[in-house]
Amino acid sequence: MARHLITSAIPYINGIKHLGNLVGSQLPADLYARYLRGRGHDVMFICATDEHGTPAELAAAKAGKPVADYCAEMHDVQAEIAAGFRLSFDHFGRSSSPQNHALTQHFARVLGEQGLIREVTEKQMYSVADGRFLPDRYIEGTCPNCGYTSARGDQCDNCTKQLDPVDLINPHSVISGSTDLEMRETKHLFLRQSAMKAKLADWIDSKTDWPVLTTSIARKWLFDGEGLQDRGITRDLSWGVPAQFEGAPWAGMEGKVFYVWFDAPIEYIAGTQEWADATGGDWARWWRTDKGAEDVTYTQFMGKDNVPFHTLGFPVTILGSGEPWKLVDYIKSFNYLNYDGGQFSTSRGRGVFMDQALSILPADYWRWWLLSHAPESADAEFTWENFQSSVNKDLADVLGNLVSRVTKFCNAKFGLEVPSEVVLGERETALMAQFSEGLAAYVKAMDAIQVRRSAEELRALWVLGNEYLQAAAPWSVVKTDEAAARGIIAFALNLIRLYAVLSRPFIPDAAQAIMTALDCEDWSWPEDLDTAIRALPAGHRFTVPENLFRKITDEEREDWAKRFAGRRD
RNA sequence: GGCUAGGUAGCUCAGCAGGUUAGAGCACGUGACUCAUAAUCACGGGGUCGGGGGUUCGAGUCCCCCCCUCGCCA
């Protein structure tokens, strides 16, 4: 039994995420976590909400709520939706937790003591009326380029020109509307990533088995242009981890907090501490190599936009601390999922959001499609036609119908119990050989976290069941040799139990429905097929389950395509 | 403009340490079967692997140039 630490990139707090976000990190992480648990390994699967920063403040202001209240509410909303998708986190934490406050300040202090943080004085826009410095996004004015009156301090949304706040005509504070703005000197902390460049480069070079997507992005940031740059890790906000604290190796940082990309990954650790505090568990054995984590395999999942923070920023924090923290072993990154010829868009409400998805169909339908089309080698594309045909064919026809025809046939001819012991005849032995080969391919793909390939191999196993049944034809055999027909069905029922076990990482609800119908609780992984195929003995009672999956009709498909094309209501 | 990843059957994608007639699923056609959610199974049609050069006995698979798409950066 091995020990696996798994983290998913933590979703930002300002609203409900769309399917592209889901398939880029949380869902494949869940697949892997479930698979490893299924194999009997010890798994710690951590996720959280990323709550600090400007967008959270803006979203809270828009909702007319204090930012702390807003985040608390949205965390609960996201947690509920995650549960709806059956994401099996051991803990779904919050980057605003006391644990993360303390740990982020701990890392900042240690990094400061290691000489990896420097103070930088720069000029920034200050709002006298608001009594605070304003991030670029908090300033609006008229674009000097196109005349758009609501251009932001960092960029004009109308003509997309990159701007500096001082470029704006009639600049004003987004918070108060005040035009009483002035440039003032201010001090920020920078993480000296550049000092760790060689070490990071060696580390990345040593990861020859990582996805190209991961290493190529890391190398680009390491070597592109002038190479890896130091990055500011503080911001002028009130919502966040205070940058001035007792024992801090610097002064004058009052009113500033750490920037999200610094504290967000630290939440992986703090989230585990939250779990420990809630359950009485031991977090250190997962994260401290001096306290039991030396044999932990740590895998991170994320979309490609998050790769720089996980290959450079966070490792600088971990390695630079000089303390024995567990460093990531494997980074699985994903491309983007597009929606019907364009991008998913949170701001324009284009595409399907997680809550909407669940309101239309149960989690398994989405899990199956998303995972079997995960954007691994390139950006992938969601279309309703593809979704409909995949779900109908793979889930309803290939798997669902197999379970249905076997259980119903048995009930009709022999009643609601396994009608015979499993006896491996020539046909069954041949199938077991094929199955064994297919299972090995499935396991190999899962071990390598090849998501699409895994789905393909799993489906191939389902198909074997149909091939077997079709060739064995118990419905005609029963007319001349009832004992033989009983044997075929006993074998098929046991095959179905195996499908439940093997399919659980992808479609946990359907897997449970099968097991419940079979009145079985043996979820153990079929390390030995010959034993596993006999798990349900003769006379074992079962029930005929409701159809596992329904089909998506053309009318529904057209209706949904129309509904999600534009504005989210 | 720089960089990344791509451009392979109608659709979604595999394949790429270069090597027999280029694969899968879906869709399509024919047949089988009738237990099952008009499901399943078998067989078949269909691609000059973005374009052009080159290396090689041999190239979707390596090199060069060009075109197109997506994203990141400037």
Image (cartoon, rainbow, N blue to C red):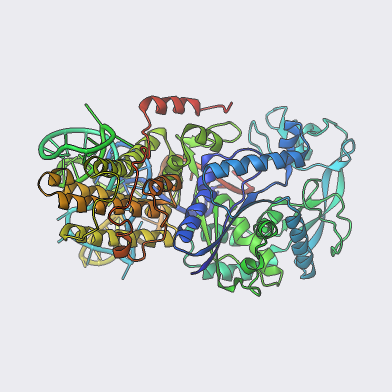
Q: Is residue A58 above or below residue A27?
A: above
Number of callouts in the render? 0
Residue B48: percent from the left, percent from the top? 24, 46
Residue A451: percent from the left, percent from the top? 43, 53
Q: In which quarter of the image is residue A399?
A: top left
Residue A106: percent from the left, percent from the top? 77, 63
> Which residue is pictured at 76% across the width and 38% down the height?
A138
Q: In which quarter of the image is residue A286?
A: bottom right
- The residue lying toward the viewer, choosing from A386 and B6, is A386
Q: In this view, does A51 lie to the left or right of A368?
A: right
Viewer can see residue A422: yes
Residue that protrudes farthest toward the bottom in the picture: A290
Q: In this view, does A402 lie above or below B17?
A: above
> Which residue is pictured at 57% across the width and 44% down the height?
A82
Q: The C terminus of chain A is located in which quarter?
A: top right
Residue A299: percent from the left, percent from the top? 54, 61
Q: Is residue A192 left or right of residue A484?
A: right
> Which residue is pictured at 85% across the width and 58% down the height?
A245
- The residue lying toward the viewer, choosing from A304 and A328, is A328
- The residue lying toward the viewer, choosing from B38 and B16, is B38
Q: In this view, does A440 lie above or below A401?
A: below
Q: In this view, does A566 lie to the left or right of B28?
A: right
Viewer can see residue A144: no
Q: Is residue A66 above or below residue A437?
A: above
> Which residue is pictured at 45% across the width and 34% down the height?
A340
